Image (cartoon, rainbow, N blue to C red):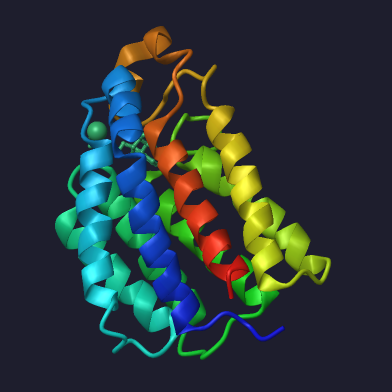
Amino acid sequence: MAGLTADWARDWVRLAAASVAEHRAELGALDRDIGDGDHGENLDRGFTAALAKVQDGAAGTPGAVLRLVATTLISTVGGAAGPLYGTAFLKAAEAAGDADTLDGPAVAALLAAARDGIVLRGRAEPGDKTMVDAWSPAVDAAAAAAAGGAEPAEVLREAARAAGEGAAATEPLVARKGRASYLGERAVGHRDPGAASSALLLAAAAEAAGSR
Ligand code: ADP
Ligand code: MG
């Protein structure tokens, strides 16, 4: 199978925008429970804008598409998540470089770069009840799949599965970063909204790869 192309990246943005729109209320409710309630709105605005930017097809490589997404998210999504996701997509774009296609190891490297960008920006560690708790297991699962010779779509499916499990596993945690950290024990029993949205984004990436 050929590697993932700019069309994959565009499909990722399209499916991510659709998924965020579909789950907008749910992400808002999660953020109302342990934050200020704006996470669904913020991301919906950002991915709607990102989709408009990439749709004309001018960006010719996966890296160019991801870079457009990064700059759009940085300028349209407020709060904590805007700069964090913006950095994630920027680092992913850098990892993709100017390659026309991405194979399994390149996809795993792209996800690792995104996670590293989030950590660099937000300084959260695994277990702090943030989006890092979705990205970290996703990166590990992607690396293992790629090392085993998996195709890019399978690498992304593994990442998405692990991200979903990681997001669910934030429920019993006390938050040590972001707004939810002000709540202490009261954050226990609630899923972190950023981890939940990260799982949606990675599921969209896998779906985009699987449909090609
Ligand atoms: P805000 O908290 O400014 O309202 P959002 O609601 O858009 O921003 O995003 C909240 C999400 O951002 C949290 O659920 C968490 O996953 C993530 N987050 C917050 N601070 C950090 C951080 N320092 N590192 C990683 N992720 C973080
Ligand atoms: Mg919020």
Residue 4 located left or right of residue 140: left
Q: Give the x, y percent position of residue 55.
A: 28, 77
Locate the C terminus by quadrant.
bottom right
Q: Give the x, y percent position of residue 60.
A: 38, 90
Residue 42 located left or right of residue 59: left
Residue 10 located left or right of residue 95: left
Residue 109 visible here: no
Looking at the picture, tell me which residue is in the foreground, 10 or 159.
10
Locate the N terminus by quadrant.
bottom right
Q: Give the x, y percent position of residue 162.
A: 65, 44
Residue 180 to residue 117: above or below: above
User: What residue is rendered at 46% in x and 38% in y?
Assistant: 195
Most extreme residue toward the top, as rendered? 185
User: What residue is rendered at 42% in x and 8% in y?
Assistant: 185
Looking at the picture, tell me which residue is in the foreground, 15 or 106.
15
Residue 50 located left or right of residue 114: left
Residue 83 visible here: yes
